[in-house]
Image: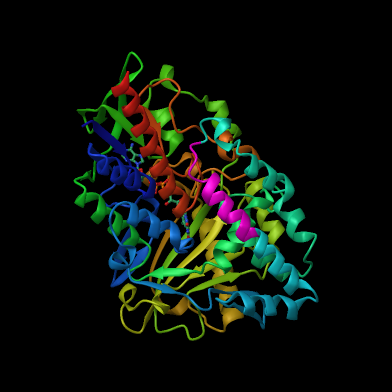
Amino acid sequence: MKKIAVIGSGFSGLSAAAFLAQQGHHVSVFEKNSSLGGRARVFTAQGFKFDMGPSWYWMPEIFDRFFKKLGADVNALLELQRLDPAFSAYFGLGDYWEIPDDETKLINLFESTEYGAGQKLENLLERAAFNYHMVMKDVIFKSGEKISEYCDPLLIYHSLKFNIFKSFASHTRSQFSDPRLLRILEFPILFLGGTPQNIPALYTIMNYAGHSLGTWYPTGGLNSLINAMVHVARNLNVQIHENANVTGINIESGTATSLRVDGENIDVDYVVAAADYHHVEQKLLAPEWRRYTPSYWDKRVLAPSCLIFYLGIKGKIGSLRHHTLFFDQNFDRHLDAIYSEARWPANPLFYVCCPSKSDATVAPPDCENLFILVPIAAGLENSHSEHERIFQNITARFAHLTGHDIRPRIVFKRTYSVNEFANDYNAFKGNAYGLANTLKQTALMKPKMKSKKVRNLYFAGQLTVPGPGVPPSLISGEIAANLVKEAIENEITI
Ligand SMILES: Cc1cc2nc3c(=O)[nH]c(=O)nc-3n(C[C@H](O)[C@H](O)[C@H](O)COP(=O)(O)OP(=O)(O)OC[C@H]3O[C@@H](n4cnc5c(N)ncnc54)[C@H](O)[C@@H]3O)c2cc1C
């Protein structure tokens, strides 16, 4: 039995901890914050319960598989609902769409918007389904340590046949021209941290994930997934420590011997660092043990950060759905503000989550819980005046488009942005979603899971393989646990 320390209690840390404990090791999780879940934490105020981060529960089979492998049943732990409509979108005044949770209805919607688009969507989803299953089987659970992991002839054949490395935009924009259809297909890209131009067409798998596998919601919010993971981890005897800030990893002759936690040294045999990769390397390791230089990090393309408003609203907002996207302004201009110019967007697109539409537990009676998210460039400094300008801009547009002026009905408001991400999670440049999934930052080209210089140090989380998002983070923890398992087995046989 080994003493294994996991730094961070986000999805990746809890996943790694549970799998390592299942192998029979003594596992401790150290989390700097007073509550668990990392970016998926929750806070309550005035009877409202706000999920602080993720709100889209996509790829349900990843969660089913995760709990099953750990001897639990997702349906016994979570009360899941499949949302229909999956989401809605405003493209302008009177131009409002509800995206059905039904492939045939979606195909009909595309066809009624643009002649031939229905058949093209059907083809796109069919190919995306094939690629999705190929990625699940042959790519996503790989550690990205060696090129040989991806040398399966069938994988290479299909990757070339479907030209999955051309850009997402060239794939979608050569087939569809109505900008509304493009927005529906391209919006998940924004959260993968790229533009349709620099993300590979492979990521149309997100369209299959979103439109064919369904948009789900666990009652109690996405943080209930964290609670379920904590429950499973504790049942496997994982020791979880909140308010436990790791300030250093002590190394002797290339081996991590202990963690420095709030002034105390905790002995370790192995470490899985599931806090932001950059923070661990640059702040917790002495320079001689770092694999990547500051200039390496400066050259990384980061996924966006966010400006978030958590709002408690008195009274109901009639027609609003659980997830609503506001595409009434220029998409490319907003992307330029994030990626090319790194400035505050003038008229940003935004996303509104209203979980109280599906869940009475997250708001007091006759109230709504709103989470409004505006993607912005990572590395921007907080600016109270820009936050307020954007708040006025989007709430005025919300009123104009939906007919509901929420401004006089706000009973609670909290603003959260780049500095909060940096302070609360030690997030590099205050990123929200880690590294962008551009072609040059995919699989083998991501920061590696195994430290090159410290024998028993491994990394997990959204800045390494496979990338940002709840399902990938969960998988990242599992891969890290497998790498540690392999190392321990090799140690025993040596
Ligand atoms: C606003 C927002 C919305 C999102 N929406 C979605 C969505 O709808 N669907 C989806 O799939 N994904 C979404 N994501 C992405 C998803 O939430 C993340 O990819 C995922 O939660 C990352 O998990 P992680 O374990 O890598 O990191 P984290 O959750 O950041 O966990 C790392 C943990 O390490 C801790 N830590 C850092 N430094 C130390 C230290 N020195 N000592 C101890 N602990 C430390 C941090 O406090 C944190 O708890 C969203 C993210 C954000 C921010």
Q: Quadrant of the N terminus?
A: top left
Residue 103 shown left or right of residue 354 in the figure: right
Q: What residue is at 41 percent from the left and 69 percent from the top?
A: 217
Residue 332 in the magenta stretch? The answer is no
- Looking at this rendering, what residue extends furthest in the top direction? 253
Q: What residue is at 48 percent from the left and 52 percent from the top?
A: 469
The spot of residue 477 in percent (x, y) is 39, 43
- The stretch of residues the image draws in magenta is 128-143
Residue 286 drawn above or below residue 362: above
| Count of residue discs | 0
Residue 50 drawn above or below residue 320: above
The spot of residue 456 in percent (x, y) is 34, 25
- Nearer to me, 374 or 68: 68
The spot of residue 8 in percent (x, y) is 33, 42
The spot of residue 120 in percent (x, y) is 74, 68
Q: Which corner quadrant of the image does residue 334 belong to?
A: bottom right
Residue 477 shown left or right of residue 201 in the figure: left
- Nearer to me, 72 or 190: 72
Q: Main secondary structure of the magenta part?
A: helix
- Nearer to me, 371 or 471: 471
Q: Quadrant of the C terminus?
A: top left
Residue 280 drawn above or below residue 215: above
Q: What residue is at 54 percent from the left and 30 percent from the top?
A: 146
| Residue 120 at least partly seen | yes
| Residue 345 at least partly seen | no
Residue 149 shown left or right of residue 267 in the figure: right
Colour convention of the picture? rainbow
Residue 140 in the magenta stretch? The answer is yes
Q: Which corner quadrant of the image does residue 386 belong to?
A: bottom right
Residue 169 shown left or right of residue 267 in the figure: right
Residue 280 drawn above or below residue 321: above
Q: What residue is at 21 percent from the left and 50 percent from the top?
A: 234
